[in-house]
């Protein structure tokens, strides 16, 4: 469920602490050094590698444009190190992502059972699938088809939405971390930013504006339910997560993963965890999403009518590791396209610079704070600069 929207290298001039700025600078230098090393290993000159990225970006046609050109071999910029693409071996066949039915959540006895299941899944997996969540199958199916309609429009129509401007509310792009990543992912995206949960419907692409509006209305309701259940699972007041406004802003990212002629060489999304507090994902029936559990890659099998809910980095931070942010990736495939819609939940606009740290009440149970306080803005600056390199951003914020 990758969220790295377009982020130019020269836009790190945020109001960060001096120590954070210095660390970011050092980290950036290391990232660029590693990227050059990776290119050399691949037999690709650094300048040529960068130029190939620029050329790809300037087409504004995305990965679908590459596929539509008739390629039988993927361009070098999409080739990932073999160890990153490796399927791995699933030793424990009993490892299955928890599926939780929340239909009767308002019933007293049933609610306690559901809260217990969510607590266990958030602590041990960092991900779960919810069914009977109240969003109709027709709404979800139309959302998937709407995303397909947008991405399968003629290139000249989509180009009107193409942008790498960080502050643009609605934008189409391919690989937000294109210029800091060591290899490009086989994926195109369109993102819609709902500041404090609000976005002018007229700002949405006509191809699926109606589908988005209906879907997001339902997602807002589900978010409230999940925030309450997670609060109770933490042993806090039911409205705790709602009151601290840590999930008021939403970035909806609609991904399109074209079929790939050489899926064994690339990825739809590199291993990463989400920088959000919470993510809700709608996926189609193609599959390909995997989560890392007990050092094994486990498939998140598509279930009709289900939505995937995963804990984000900032939720792990404020719960002091009581809930875990899950590492996940998306495999490329010959069949496709794969289509998904990820809703990433962040603080309200007013709280963008508010420091969040481990919840004091939880420290009685978890022990001393593991992380220092950080704002959403600070965390995102580091996350975006680092790119989807397979490593979590959380260690940088440890005490």
Image: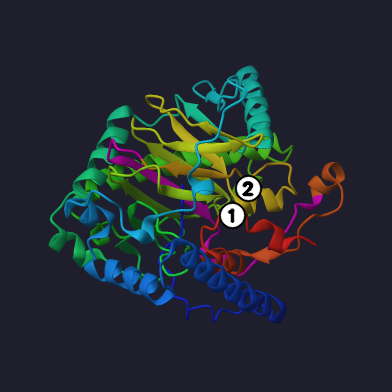
Does the image show residue 165? Answer: no
Measured as percent of width and height from the top left, residue 56 is found at 28, 66
Q: Position of residue 298 (x, y in %)?
A: 54, 31
For this rendering, which residue is in front, 366 or 227? 366
Q: What's the distance in space between the residues labelled 1 and 2, CA to CA?
A: 7 Å
The stretch of residues the image draws in magenta is 333-360
Residue 358 within the magenta-colored segment of the rendering:
yes
Q: Is residue 273 above or below residue 136?
A: below
Q: Is residue 68 left or right of residue 85?
A: left
Residue 246, which numbered label?
Answer: 1
Name the image quarter holding residue 195.
bottom left
Q: Position of residue 227 (x, y in %)?
A: 58, 41
Q: Secondary structure at mark 1?
A: loop
Classed neighbour count for the residue bearing mark 1: other residues with Cα under 10 Å, few (<14), some (14–19), many (≥20): many
Identify the residue under disc 2.
241
Q: Where is residue 167, by image quadrant?
A: bottom left
Q: Secondary structure at mark 2?
A: helix
Residue 191 in view here: yes
In the displayed structure, does residue 184 sit left or right of residue 102? left
Question: How far across and down, in percent of the image, does residue 388 sit?
Answer: 51, 58
Q: What label does residue 170 carry, if any?
A: none
Residue at screen point 43% across, 70% down: 179
The reply to whether discs 1 and 2 touch (Cβ–Cβ < 8 Å) is: yes
């Amino acid at each position: 469920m990758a969220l790295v929207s377009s982020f130019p290298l020269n836009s790190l001039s945020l109001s960060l602490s001096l120590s954070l700025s210095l660390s970011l600078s050092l980290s950036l230098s290391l990232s660029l050094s590693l990227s050059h090393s990776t290119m050399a290993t691949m037999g690709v000159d650094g300048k040529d590698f960068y130029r190939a990225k620029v050329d790809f970006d300037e087409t504004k046609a995305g990965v679908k444009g590459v596929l539509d050109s008739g390629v039988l071999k993927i361009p070098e910029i999409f080739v990932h190190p073999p160890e990153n693409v490796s399927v791995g071996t699933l030793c424990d066949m009993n490892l299955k992502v928890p599926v939780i039915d929340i239909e009767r959540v308002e019933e007293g006895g049933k609610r306690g059972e559901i809260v217990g299941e969510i607590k266990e899944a958030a602590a041990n997996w960092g991900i779960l699938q919810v069914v009977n969540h109240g969003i109709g199958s027709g709404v979800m199916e139309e959302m998937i088809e709407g995303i397909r309609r947008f991405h399968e429009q003629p290139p000249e129509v989509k180009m009107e939405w193409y942008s790498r401007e960080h502050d643009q509310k609605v934008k189409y792009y391919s690989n937000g971390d294109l210029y800091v990543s060591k290899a490009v992912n086989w994926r195109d995206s369109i993102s819609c930013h709902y500041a404090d949960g609000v976005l002018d419907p007229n700002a949405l692409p006509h191809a699926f504006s109606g589908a988005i509006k209906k879907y997001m209305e339902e997602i807002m309701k589900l978010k409230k339910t999940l925030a309450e259940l997670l609060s109770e699972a933490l042993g806090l007041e039911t409205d705790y997560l709602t009151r601290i406004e840590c999930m008021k802003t939403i970035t909806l990212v609609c991904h399109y993963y074209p079929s790939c002629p050489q899926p064994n060489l690339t990825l739809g999304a590199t291993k990463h965890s989400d920088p959000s507090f919470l993510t809700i994902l709608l996926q189609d029936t193609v599959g390909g999403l995997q989560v890392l559990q007990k050092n094994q890659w486990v498939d998140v099998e598509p279930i009709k009518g289900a939505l995937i809910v995963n804990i984000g980095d900032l939720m792990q931070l404020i719960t002091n590791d009581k809930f875990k942010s899950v590492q996940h990736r998306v495999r490329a495939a010959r069949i496709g396209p794969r289509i998904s819609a990820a809703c990433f939940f962040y603080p309200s606009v007013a709280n963008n610079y508010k420091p969040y740290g481990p919840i004091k009440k939880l420290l009685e149970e978890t022990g001393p704070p593991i992380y220092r306080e950080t704002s959403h803005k600070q965390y995102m600056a580091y996350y975006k600069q680092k790119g989807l390199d397979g490593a979590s951003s959380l260690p940088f914020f440890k005490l």
